Image: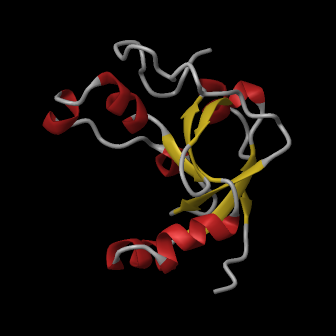
Amino acid sequence: MEYWEDLTNIRCCPPQDANFPDGVAAYYRLIDHDPPDWEDIRARVENDAYLKLEDSRKCTSKSCSIFGTNNQLKEKFLIKGSPAMQARYRKSEIFSVILKPEDGKIKEGKKGHFDWWVSRSFVDSPNRWIKEEKND
């Protein structure tokens, strides 16, 4: 599979315990643009600190953060988040997407958070994001 981010120089990325999405479950993300564009799923910026990371951390930094439910995203950003995270939540929109196996690989973390290594085919395909209500 070809990934949108360059993973070629990172050993075991995506990690072996990452899985292909099932094509049924929806995932949620804060999005800055409506409609979403490629900047909304960009990985973190490479800088001098990135170059010093071990491969597993470099790999995670090349993933896109998504959540298993709208409520898990809201809890992370609005309820338990720092003031900066709360401000980002308020200025952004929540979008959901049903990920198919060809959209990349995902790995579940804590409290409903997933790392998603986005495939090139997802970025090149028509937009499948669905805007959700915040209901704050």
Task: Compare residues 32 and 72 and report the one nearer the observer.
Answer: 72
Residue 132 percent coordinates (x, y): 73, 69
Numbered disc total: 0
Q: Which residue is painted at 40% across and 28% down in the image?
A: 59
Q: Quadrant of residue 1?
A: top right
Q: Is residue 53 above or below residue 39?
A: above
Left or right for 5, reference 49: right
Q: Quadrant of residue 44?
A: top left
Left or right for 126, reference 1: right
Q: Which residue is painted at 59% across and 25% down in the image?
A: 17
Q: Which residue is painted at 19% across and 28% down in the image?
A: 51
Q: Is residue 96 above or below residue 77?
A: above
Residue 55 percent coordinates (x, y): 32, 23
Q: Is residue 118 above or below residue 32?
A: above
Colour mode of the rendering: secondary structure
Q: Quadrant of residue 18?
A: top right
Left or right for 59, reference 122: left
Q: Which residue is painted at 64% across and 59% down in the image?
A: 35
Q: Residue furthest front?
A: 110
Residue 120 percent coordinates (x, y): 59, 25
Residue 29 percent coordinates (x, y): 59, 57
Assign the C terminus to one quadrant of the image.
bottom right
Q: Residue furthest bottom?
A: 136
Q: Is residue 15 above or below residue 90?
A: above
